Amino acid sequence: MLIAAVLASTLAFVGVGWTIGCPEETAPLEPGSAFALGGAVASLALLFLAIVWPISAPAFGLMAWTLVLFGFAMLGRRIDRLRGGDTTRPAAWRRASWIDRLAGAAAVVAFGLFVWKIAAVQIWSWDHFAIWGVKARQLAAHGLALDFLAGPQIHPLRTDHPLGLPLLWALLSAGQVPQPLSFKIAHLMMGGLLAICFRDLARRFGAATWAANLLTATLCLSPLYYDSEFLGLAEMPLALWSCAAVSWAVRSRSVPQALACGLTLGFLPWLKQEGLPLALLLLCVIGAWLRRASPAHDRRTFIRIAAPALALCVAAVVYQRWVLPPEDGFLAGNLRERLIQRSGEVPELLQLALYELLAWDWLGFWVVFAIGSGCAIKLRSPNARALAAIVWIQSALYLAVCYGSPAPAAEQLRAAFYRTCAALVPLGLLALAALAGDRKDATVSDSRALR
Amino acid sequence: MKTIPSRPTRLQTLGLILLVVAIEIGRAANLARSGAVGGVAHNERRWHTWSYRRSDLPSLFARVRSCLREGDTVAVMVPHGQHHGWWQVMTLYYLPDHRLAGVYDIDDRTARAAARVFIRRHGGFHVARPAAPC
């Protein structure tokens, strides 16, 4: 029953995303972006509804099931329209060289290892029990009245963390209290959708088929997939939504697609606090890409992306500060004094950060990525440079947060830096894909990814 | 835009794929050896033992739940020296339908109005309420 509920809800989100994001497009859209859009729209709609009208547990369950049925109806209509239209995929597979197929098989095996691992382990991460999972279960059990966050019994919960992901999980369980198995299935689904979305993007950024397949295999072997700590945490969704936002930006030819990009971007701060700077950085990069592609025409497209994205970002900050019960954040207390006191710790912190980024489980990702970033600068590869800049700025920001945290800086870094950086791997690998695309054909215009 | 003249040869590409395959074989061997227990990845080695202190919690709380009545407020009584915050989080997670009065030492007498769940150090529990023990 649980498995059926999560699968049905996932398909429903895909249906909703397809319907909203490309009402006219007949070409199949990869399901990762559609799921991200459908999930964002459904979660945010329920959350905003809950502010004006507290939703009880039975009403929440009813809404979740209505959403599933609606999504299925939309999915059915879309499949009807697509039936018979797309015959390119088998042909493309037949055209693939043996090296493409071998790299594809490596990607499938890497994903299989992820499934094996997640199926074998128990959920164990402390943040799942103390922050994310407990909120999802409480939301499903008590509805969206949000009373439970203000009660004295939830003192150890981080009440200032956004509620988008717990709500999404509760919706994925079709309104039932999510069980550990639901979180596992949701994690596997999101991992699969991210891999599909990533591969599609890598191809769009100009990587050859074998390179896209091999990068997808690398993604599936990265800590984000391999470390079971991420099971039930917000890093996988954050990575999926950031890739989906880029994916929508790449295909933002029509008004609905631009709006879809904005909505997907705007959902990032609702997933995790780190989502806010990530959304703003992605928005800047998308703006730069659009400007380079066609300044006159794409100003309107950018406004269509930026308006919903910024509105949702502002709403996330307002919701976090004034609707959710207050809690001391990472930068609480006398920040200035703390920063001055810790200035002597900087070399030690940098050394610790390096130790975290050079751990074996990264498989040398950060070394390759640093070299790739250098190449991107030297080659003036716009897409690779922009994506690499996002990853470096965002990881520097994580480091700064550890430095300014009220907890001892080294302790905070050991606890969070490795984990938060893992969510940036897909964007980093996309930068390498864009670089590979530029190597393949350096004469293609800067705006290859967008048009 | 500058160009890099060379593209990887077929042999280089094959080498990259084989490298990934070798990593996959190594990971598969690790997984086969470690089984269901975490402890092969970086943060698993670091945090698993600290975070996942009892493997019997899902079954323990499932049994506790079957002994509780709908709407019961729960007080969790834990052995001396155990971390109250940890039990509080786990109770909130595993018993979302019940209000939590708090977590207390096993001999504390302050939460008598609630259904008291006494947790034993090495597994097992009993629920005490004024009228009907379970």
Image: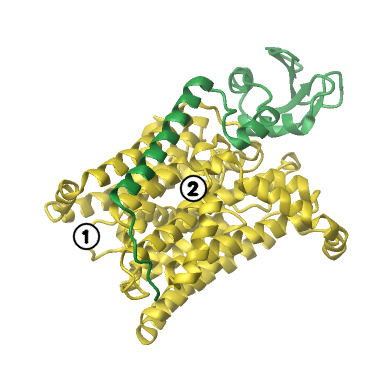
**What residue lies at 30% left-to-right and 59% top-to-bottom?**
A19
Q: Which mark is residue A388?
A: none
Residue B91 image offset from top left, x and y in percent: 68, 30
**What residue lies at 46% left-to-right and 42% top-to-bottom?**
A61
Residue A241 image offset from top left, x and y in percent: 46, 55
Residue A208 against residue A318 in the figure, above or below: above
Mark 1 vs mark 2: same chain?
yes
Q: Is residue A342 shown left or right of residue A20?
A: right
Q: Which corner quadrant holds the C terminus of chain B?
A: top right
**For residue A272, which quarter of the picture?**
bottom right
The residue under label 2 is which amino acid type? Leu
Mark 1 vs mark 2, foreground winner is 1
Q: Is residue A232 shown left or right of residue A100?
A: right
Residue A227 image offset from top left, x and y in percent: 54, 37
Q: Which chain is yellow?
A: A
Q: Between residues A167 and B133, which one lies in front from this camera angle?
A: A167
**Quick one: which residue is furthest to the bottom in this view?**
A296
Residue named by callout 1: A27
Q: Between residues A354 and A44, which one lies in front from this camera angle?
A: A354
Q: Which chain is green?
A: B
Q: Is residue A282 shown left or right of residue A198?
A: right
**Any part of residue A70 in sight:** no
Q: Which corner quadrant holds the N terminus of chain B?
A: bottom left
Residue A73 against residue A301 in the figure, above or below: above
Q: Which mark is residue A168?
A: 2
**What residue lies at 58% left-to-right and 62% top-to-bottom?**
A392
Q: Between residues B98 and A438, which one lies in front from this camera angle?
A: A438
Q: Chain of mark 1?
A: A
